[in-house]
Amino acid sequence: MASFVSEFAGQALVRNKAIVSKGTKQVTKALFSRKPAAPKTGTATKKASPVKRSAPVKKAAPTPAKKSSPIKRAAPKKVAPKKVAAPKRGASAPAPKSDASYNLDKWYGPDRKLFLPGGTLPRETVPAWLTGELAGDYGYDPLSIGATEEGVKRLRGYELLHARWAMLSIPGMLLPEYQSYASGNSVVAPVWFETGGAMLDGGLLTWYGIPIPLPLIGALVVEFLIFGAIEDYRKRCDGPLGSGLDPLYPGGLYFDPLGLADDPDAFAELKVKEIKNGRLAMMATLGFGAQAYVTKEGPYANWAQHVADPFGYNLFTVIGNAERVPTL
């Protein structure tokens, strides 16, 4: 029985193997024996034209950037040289202020100091034309000489010029007399009111031992020409030292070489100092004249005697003393 079963299984396997191999051959034959389908009648098979590749695009050569032509600047026009005007105060660019502080409200404006102590003079009584704009304006004009602001400015010019001449005259009166006293009377006519008399007598002046070869008439002509030219220059504000100058405060290289008034605040304070010292000099000049009339001596001789004996030689002992003899 067992042999029968094994024989039957072996035959079945051989048969199945034959069937499989036969099927495989048929499939292989069918795959490789297939003919291409015949084309339809009336239509020709067109060979596909090979795709032409587009030529590579040539990159445009970079165009060199054009250099911009340089801008031609117009040549500066030649201007004919003109007279250089001295800078006016306040017209030029403001100079840098210094570290110094200035209390200008004390000298200018409605709250400035007045000629009487604070509180004793009501500010409502100050003349309307004294506005505090000018240096040294203390609200004093009892005779109403100014009357208008224009009149005040005009009189200020006269006052300032006389103040400056007085400040120059004080050393001119004192120094020759002092030099004569110190050098043992070597100066001709050292006292200021004797100078003209000595020249009228035909004498010549000397300055520190140097004779001045000018008679009285010659000295007068020279002074007239010099001061006439100066006054004309000041009036026209045009001359060899510049044009367009301020007639009262010219400034600049020739009239302020040290630049003391470059700072506007310092300049405003210097104006006050100048007019105060100028007024004092005018009063001193008036006092020199009164002393000369009463004592018949020069200011230095009066001062020297007063210092030597303050209580024995003063205003009260001199006035009315007809017996005193002028001495140096």
Image (cartoon, helix red, strand yellow):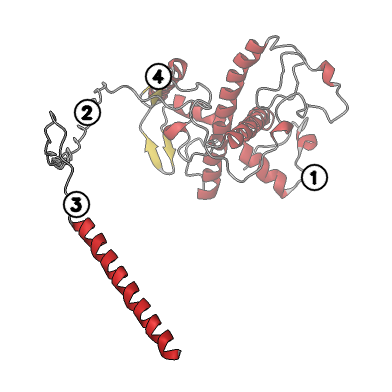
- SS under mark 1: loop
Rounded to the nearest angstrom, the CA distance separating label 1 from label 3 is 164 Å
Q: Which residue is mark 2?
A: 72
Where residue 257 sits in the image (x, y, percent)? 45, 38
Which of these two is toward me, 12 or 101?
A: 12
Where residue 199 sits in the image (x, y, percent)? 45, 27
Where residue 63 sits in the image (x, y, percent)? 17, 37
Residue under the point 56% across and 23% down: 161
Q: Which residue is mark 1?
A: 311
Kindly identify the amino acid type of the residue bearing the numbered disc 1: Phe
- Foreground mark, 1 or 4? 4
Q: Which residue is mark 4?
A: 238
- Foreground mark, 4 or 2? 2
Which of these two is toward me, 17 or 50?
A: 17
- SS under mark 2: loop
Q: Which residue is mark 3?
A: 34
